[in-house]
């Protein structure tokens, strides 16, 4: 089953609509979707390393654009939509801590949290709710998301073939580590 899923993702990553799929996942992940864009970004760069920078730029711009949706949810619809999204991810305690940190540290909180495995939707929704300056939010989002995605692109561009071989030989291990990282991100979100 894992091999079939891996093969499907690799086919999607090498398909002509791969960039659009990446943009869609990066966009919705920034406001409501639980799966990070790395699920597509990594295989796309492994399949086509010459497009690494374009894919990183696509993920960055789509994530920032999706961040505006998350910001709007927090700004205009926190009580009806934003709270439901954060409660679904059990992120209300982290949201409260984000509000305090944003008041104290400003854009640095968005830059730092936007680069971590903590779901970015927490940052975008909370930023809208606290009415974080939109220009500062945009600047911090561009910095954090580009650092995250371009770092992944750089690592895969330079070390992609050995990484691909490692993944293919140890698919169960890599899948387990990815799942643990995803769950770990939500646990960090819940307890920090």
Image: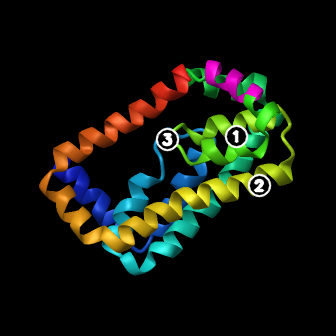
| Front label number (1 vs 3) | 1
Q: Secondary structure at mark 2?
A: helix
Q: Earlier in the sequence, mark 3 or mark 2?
A: 3
Q: Which residues are magenta?
A: 92-100
Q: What secondary structure characterizes most of the magenta part?
A: helix
Residue drawn at x 82%, y 51% is 136
Q: Position of residue 168 (x, y in %)?
A: 17, 58
Q: Crowding near pointer 2: few (<14 within 10 Å), some, many (20+)?
A: some
Disc 2 marks which residue?
A: 138
Quarter of the image holding residue 98? Answer: top right
Q: Secondary structure at mark 1?
A: helix
Disc 3 marks which residue?
A: 117
Q: Earlier in the sequence, mark 1 or mark 3?
A: 1
Establish if 90 lies above or below 146.
above
Q: CA distance from mark 1 to mark 3?
A: 14 Å
Q: Position of residue 34 (x, y in %)?
A: 49, 38
Q: Residue furthest left?
A: 169
Q: Position of residue 10 (x, y in %)?
A: 29, 63
Can see residue 1? no
Establish if 54 lies above or below 70.
below
Quarter of the image holding residue 189? Answer: top right
């Amino acid at each position: 089953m894992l091999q079939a899923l891996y093969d499907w993702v690799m086919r999607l990553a090498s398909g002509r609509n791969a960039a659009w799929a990446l943009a869609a996942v990066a966009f919705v992940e920034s406001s409501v979707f639980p799966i990070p864009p790395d699920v597509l970004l990594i295989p796309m760069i492994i399949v086509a390393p010459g497009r690494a920078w374009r894919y990183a730029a696509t993920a960055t711009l789509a994530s920032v654009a999706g961040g505006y949706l998350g910001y709007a949810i927090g700004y205009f619809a926190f009580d009806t939509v934003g709270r439901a999204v954060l409660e679904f991810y059990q992120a209300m305690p982290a949201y409260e801590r984000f509000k305090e940190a944003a008041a104290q540290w400003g854009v640095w909180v968005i830059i730092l949290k936007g680069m971590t495995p903590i779901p970015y939707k927490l940052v975008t929704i909370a930023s809208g709710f606290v009415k974080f300056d939109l220009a500062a939010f945009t600047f911090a989002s561009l910095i954090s998301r580009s650092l995250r995605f371009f770092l992944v692109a750089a690592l895969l561009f330079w070390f992609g073939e050995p990484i691909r071989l490692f993944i293919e030989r140890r698919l169960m291990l890599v899948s387990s580590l990815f799942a643990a990282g995803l769950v770990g991100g939500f646990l960090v979100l819940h307890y920090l």
